[in-house]
Image (cartoon, rainbow, N blue to C red):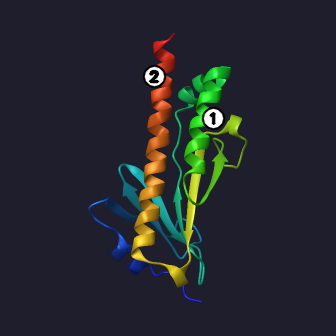
Amino acid sequence: MPHLAKDTVVQWCDEAVIHTISDRSGSDDALYNLELEVSGMPIHAVCEGEGDPLRLVCRPTFDAETLSLLTDMDAERRNFHTLVTSVITNTKGAYTFLDDDKNPCEFGELRHIQFEHRIYPQNATRQEFMDSVLELGSAAQFIIQATENLRSEVDSTR
């Protein structure tokens, strides 16, 4: 079964939304790894091998000091957990909490959230690709901004 060709993915990128495309191929064993910048957030379009789906991966990183502040107190931890839960349950695809070393972890140890959506070659369309890229980018941007807003609220009450 064929994979989604790198040239096709590049052609499908809407330049009005995807500001830069960087080829990161060679940094891993994938057939290709394209880094797409959407509103300052990197999203990787990765194809591991022949017949494999296109993996769209976005990994927003949280400021360590902000996370510490938001997870040290019960009320802030609940608010942060509610925020994260609302985003991950409303974003299609899978998510994984990652620690500082980018290993899967529990919520209390998270430093990154990895969002991933897979597009299978036999059903791939430009619309599905761009919808997925925009959804991942929006989810990542929202969760980072909302986390900073929570921190500002905590800071203003101290």
Residue 23 appears in view? no
Q: Is mark 2 on a helix, strand or loop?
A: helix
For the N terminus, the image quarter is: bottom right
- Nearer the N terminus, badge 1 or badge 2? 1
The furthest residue to the bottom: 1
Measured as percent of width and height from the top left, residue 123 is found at: 52, 81
* Residue at (44% x, 77% y) in the render: 125
The tag on residue 96 is none
Q: Where is residue 56 in the image (x, y as percent from the top left)?
A: 52, 64
Location of residue 144 in the rendering, given as x and y in whole percent from the top left corner: 48, 39
Relative to 135, is 97 above or below?
A: above
- Can you tell which mark lies on residue 152? 2
Q: Which amino acid does label 2 sit on?
A: Ser
Q: Is residue 103 above or below residue 2?
A: above
Q: Which of marks 1 and 2 is in front?
A: 1
Which residue was labeled with disc 1? 81
Observer able to see residue 80: yes
User: In the rendered structure, which amino acid carries the disc numbered 1?
Assistant: His
Residue most toward the left?
16
